[in-house]
Amino acid sequence: MKLTILSVAYPFAPVGPDAVGGAEQVQAQVERATVQAGHRSIVIAMEGSQVAGELIAIPAHRALDDCARSVGRAKVREAIAKALESEDVDVLHFHGIDFAEYLPQQGPPALVTLHLPPDWYPSGIWTISRPKTHIHCVSQSQASRCPPAARLWPVIPNGVDLDLFRARSEKRGFALMLGRVCPEKGFHIGMDAADRARIPVWIGGEVFGYEAHQRYFREQIQSRLQYTNHRFLGPLNSVRKRRLLAGAKCLLVPSLAPETSSLVAMEALASGTPVIAFQSGALTEIVEHGVTGFLVENGCEMTEAISQIERIDPSACRKAAEERFPLRETTEAYLAEYRRMFEEEWRALYDECPRVTPFASPEWLSGWPLNLQKVRRNGKLVAIAALGEMQLSDYRDVLVQDRDAAEKLWAKLPPCTLDEIPPDSPFLEAITCKTEDASWCPFVRLNDLIFPSKLEKNLRLQRHKLQQRGGEFCLASLGETSEYLEALFELHSRRWHGEGVLESEELKAFHRQVAPAFARRGWLRFHGIRLDGRLCAVLYAFAKDGRVYYYLSGYDPVLADCGPGSLLIHEAMRYAIEQGDCEFDFLRGAEPYKYRWGAENRINKRVLKI
């Protein structure tokens, strides 16, 4: 399932692997992983940003005063509106501290990543009324500082690409500080601590155009550079940064702010370089005192820690990074959130649509490589069609909230064939199109059902044989889903001598995902026969809105003389009647055995758009 993600950066800092800010680096990492996973990525960010997908550039501003910020945010609002109007955006992802200034009131689901201390954000973000808007933190420390009433999604910790960093056994004689040069980073404290420890400190970073940052650099950093061996290196590209991290004796992080995370500390550990940091926010979650570095209270303790840094084993630093900060876990978590957010909206539309089968649900369809065509009205998803091959879906359908949504979707669809559309589909009722007959789907009406006398007689004989052998009928509970499914795989293979439809591991993986999801929705029915406590026959069916869909079955050939297939169908029909169901659907295929149960035909349609 391919999604389109529109990610929106803080408008006044470029995004990319060489970005100075951690938020911009994280956004670049996640955006690159989004493209690598086959999704479409659109990024709204400052000009000069480096992205893997498509960049919508916002003009840069030299002086970051109130006027420049107002103009920049207006440009972002304009860019978001145009993107939502022209593109099928599935999820919005915001990274800026000022996201509330340009968060659209309507539109697709939105994820907001808080990269900075919670109390730096406007208080109004905790009571945003926009639906489908989810806020999350990047560390437990950060989440603990959010207001108690804040409704947060699960934390997604940051990570680093371990393959890019290498540990060196030989270290050079300098300490390192990296990041934005601003008062809250406390670089002047680190310089004084290194000066007392008689070790030069090299500073890599950028002084942004904020007046307070410029003044801090002039008054606190430049003055300390004049009479020491310390060096200011300016902004670093990723190659040079990695080389310096690997060669540094230690990384100093004298942050005065409650750090929400620290990519540079993670990168240092991945480079086998110990970290000396203030006990500030999430730094206590990253640095293991005495193992991967030291946590200190002030500049004097930082000086003492520098003198003790030889006690830290570089290999322990690298090992900690490998175990705790792999980037893959971070990016997979974001991709899973994108998918979950879109499926939540898709599921809401599905639940609003009448007469839809389980085969049109996101639980069934999201596992297929489909091209999803969508229509939104005032930001809400109101129609969706899944285009692509799905050989195991006996019914295909198009979800439409109403006639207007159906007509707009039909106009939007490219030339295509929509196969196996149920004849009573609201989509078919709403559009004018060319159709053909597709598959026959025999079904039995359960109301006042009377079986042919010959069938009744055979069922009684088969049931008697089964009872004589000690067989017992059973129905799976929610907790038994996995047992019945794995038994079905084995029994179906035995029944068809290794040539059944469930032989491939890919299909097994698909049903291992679908069956529990259907069970949670109350749609799954597993009927079985146990012999001496062991499942010897299983019938796999779905039930929704008074209709039961018989999907597959399997049984041990040793039970063949008892007719386990027929007995399970009979048992499933009896149970369906008890539950008040009105139809038993045999799905596609006009096999003779289906008509012995008194089945009649439902004929699916093939819709042609030329």
Image: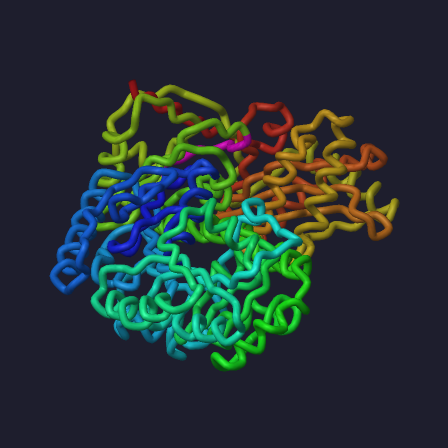
In the rendered image, residue 460, in percent from the top left (x then y), is placed at 76, 41
The one of 149 and 471 positioned closer to us in this rendering:
149
Task: Tell me: 413 left or right of 444.
Answer: left
Task: Tell me: 503 left or right of 73.
Answer: right
The one of 41 and 268 positioned closer to us in this rendering:
268
Report which quarter residue 268 is drawn in: bottom right
397 to 195, vertically: above or below: above
In the rendered image, residue 380, in percent from the top left (x then y), is placed at 27, 50
Q: Is residue 394 magenta?
A: yes
User: Outermost residue, front direction?
Assistant: 227
In the rendered image, residue 176, in percent from the top left (x then y), is placed at 49, 61
Query: Which quadrant: the C terminus?
Result: top left
* Residue displayed at 27% across by 68% down: 218
Count every numbered label the image shows and give the total. 0
220 to 99, vertically: above or below: below
Q: Is residue 172 magenta?
A: no
Q: How is the image coloured?
A: rainbow
164 to 189, vertically: above or below: above
* Residue displayed at 62% across by 35% down: 507
* Residue displayed at 26% across by 39% down: 87
The one of 196 and 145 positioned closer to us in this rendering:
196
**Residue range corresponding to the magenta coloring:** 392-398
Task: Tell me: 267 left or right of 50.
Answer: right
Query: Which quadrant: the N terminus?
Result: top left
The answer to whether residue 580 is seen in the rendering is no
Most common secondary structure along the magenta stretch: loop
Report which quarter residue 170 is drawn in: bottom right
The answer to whether residue 79 is seen in the rendering is yes
In the rendered image, residue 94, in percent from the top left (x then y), is placed at 32, 56
